[in-house]
Image: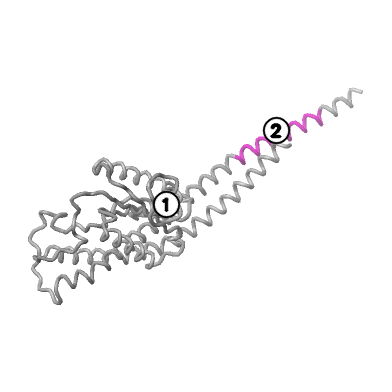
Amino acid sequence: MATLRETRNRIVAVRNTSKITQAMRMVAAAKLRRAQDAITAARPFARQLEKILRNLAMAESDFVHPYFEARASVQHIVIAVLSSDRGLCGAFNANLFRAVQHRIDKLQAQYPGAEIKIVAVGRKSVAQFSKMSHEVIASHPDAFFKLEYSTATSIADHASDVFLTHRADIIELIYNEFVSVIKQEVKILPLLPIIPAAQKTEHSGSAVDYIFEPTRADILESLLPKYLHTQVWRALLDSNAAEQAARMVAMENATTNARDLISSLQLIYNRERQAVITKEMLEIVGGAEALVAH
């Protein structure tokens, strides 16, 4: 009887868990719709702003903004890692941290002796890199708890400051890009220095010759901070959408697995219950036969 009770209790526990995972799947689906709308709306603006900026950078001028200056000697590298604040999202964070470690190994091989520091965005990122040897120079543990544009400006302005003061020679963002509901890809985004379009697309043809009013330098000074803010904001939105998609799929899989487990446990329970009933019937029959014999 104890085995029957244990099996029944386990069925109840798994059924309750499946209700929780189903509810979490529905919440993640609702959040995903909003996150997907946000990143879909943000991407065209970010791409167009990047296009304008790179055309400005290609224009003939003696003025070169410090953001475009590649350092001859790379001694300091900063990587901003965008993780989730919460768990239960499958391999979302594990894949991200694996890619970050691979990138760190590659940068250390490419720039021997360079110091690599971390900007941790998201609770999981803060927890992960607090255990590692790389210095965490800035933390945003609740970035995705309530995603706001001010978080993007804070990260971008800090990146700008450490780059302009030569505390960083290269700054990169590593995050999960939302591709589809079932696909998220880890992306490495070079933030600073900014690579002009001519260096990225050598065979793209001649650049358009613009007349600038006010001056090209004035436009760049005004546009560059907005560009950095937008790039970081797009990465945050991408990561948020990717997280919700990963969580929705993970909870859907968990719910399906729970239902399969309930079916298996129900079969075991029925088999055990049938065995108990059969045993009791045999005992009754045996007792009746003993009485008849006497």
Residue 278 or residue 217, whichever sits in front: 217
- Which residue is labeled 2 in the image? 275
At label 1, the amino acid type is: Ser
At label 2, the amino acid type is: Ala
Give how far across and how far down residue 234 sits, in percent.
32, 62
Q: Residue furthest right?
A: 294
Instruction: Judge left or right: residue 212 versus residue 95.
Output: left
Give how far across and how far down residue 177 sits, in percent.
33, 54
Q: Is residue 169 above or below residue 234?
A: above
Give how far across and how far down residue 30 sits, in percent.
45, 62
Question: Please, what secondary structure does the residue beneath circle 1 have?
Answer: helix
Instruction: Judge left or right: residue 83 versus residue 64.
Output: right
Task: Name which residue lies at 38% across and 68% down.
Answer: 150
How far is disc 1 from disc 2 in space, using C-alphas? 52 Å
Disc number for residue 290: none
Magenta segment includes 277: yes
- Which residue is labeled 1 in the image? 125
Give how far across and how far down residue 259 sits, in percent.
55, 46
Quadrant of image for the C terminus: top right
Q: Residue furthest bottom?
A: 213
Task: Name which residue lies at 34% across and 50% down.
Answer: 117
